[in-house]
Image (cartoon, grey):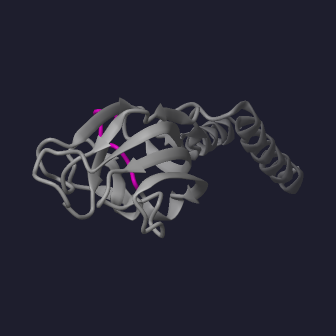
């Protein structure tokens, strides 16, 4: 009996350890960010946001107003995001099909779970605002992120699971234990 309890305790521990909890979404106000140079060049607006160590980005929702300064285009304004090193970034262009200068409003959502984008142990999400084509001299802004936000769904690595998930694991393990007792009894 003692050995069965040890196995059950080990199974519960493994079950709970394998669960990943959803952390609160991270909303970032992008008002005033500038798209200045090409991705990776000095002078770009770069923000580091703490989302939790080894967090995985699961989704992106956006509601934005952009202003591309002529002759630059709304389709050229982009934000790249990923870990703090800047080496593993995904680039997002909200106005990707808008080949106009001036103001544009965009909203939508994207499932990021298939991309496996995570931040490192430092927990910092890097955002770099840039332009896909340089129309002006280096260091001159191509456009402004006038208002709005980017909201990232974040799965927190190593976080405590939600109570409902814990209850389901315990219920399942209890049923397994009951079935074993009935079989041996």
Task: Residue 120: say if magenta.
Answer: yes
- Residue at the image position 36 percent from the left and 31 percent from the top: 49
Query: Is 172 or 4 nearer to us in this picture?
Result: 172
Query: Is 67 or 131 nearer to us in this picture?
Result: 67
Q: Residue 83: x and y, percent?
A: 29, 45
Q: Residue 105: x and y, percent?
A: 55, 51
- Residue at the image position 86 percent from the left and 56 percent from the top: 183
Read off the magenta span: 117-125
Residue 46 appears in which quarter of the rendering? top left
- Quadrant of the rendering where the N terminus is positioned: top right
Q: How many marks?
A: 0
Q: Residue 177: x and y, percent?
A: 78, 46
- Residue at the image position 56 percent from the left and 34 percent from the top: 23
Q: Viewed as shown, does residue 98 lie left or right of 77?
A: right
Query: Is 179 or 108 nearer to us in this picture?
Result: 108
Q: Viewed as shown, does residue 180 lie left or right of 33?
A: right
Q: Residue 128: x and y, percent?
A: 28, 45
Location of residue 14 with respect to 76 vertically, above or below: above
Task: Residue 67: say if magenta.
Answer: no
Q: Viewed as shown, does residue 94 lie left or right of 7?
A: left
- Let me know if residue 125 appears in the view: no
Magenta stretch prevailing secondary structure: loop
Q: Viewed as shown, does residue 171 lie left or right of 124?
A: right
Residue 11 appears in which quarter of the rendering? top right
- Let me know if residue 159 appears in the view: yes
Location of residue 147 with respect to 178 vertically, above or below: above
């Amino acid at each position: 009996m003692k050995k069965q309890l040890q196995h059950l305790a080990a199974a519960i521990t493994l079950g709970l350890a394998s669960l990943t909890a959803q952390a609160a979404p991270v909303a970032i106000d992008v008002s005033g960010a500038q798209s200045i140079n090409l991705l990776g060049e000095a002078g770009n607006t770069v923000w580091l946001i703490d989302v939790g160590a080894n967090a995985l980005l699961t989704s992106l929702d956006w509601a934005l107003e952009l202003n591309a300064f002529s002759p630059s285009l709304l389709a050229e304004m982009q934000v790249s995001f990923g870990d703090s090193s800047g080496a593993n970034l995904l680039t997002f262009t909200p106005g990707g099909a808008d080949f106009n200068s001036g103001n544009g409003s965009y909203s939508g959502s994207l499932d990021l779970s298939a991309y496996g984008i995570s931040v490192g142990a430092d927990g910092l999400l890097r955002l770099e605002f840039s332009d896909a084509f340089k129309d002006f001299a280096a260091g001159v802004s191509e456009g402004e992120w006038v208002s709005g936000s980017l909201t990232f769904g974040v799965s927190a690595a190593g976080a405590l699971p939600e109570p409902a998930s814990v209850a389901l694991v315990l219920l399942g393990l209890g049923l397994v234990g009951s079935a074993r007792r009935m079989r041996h009894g």
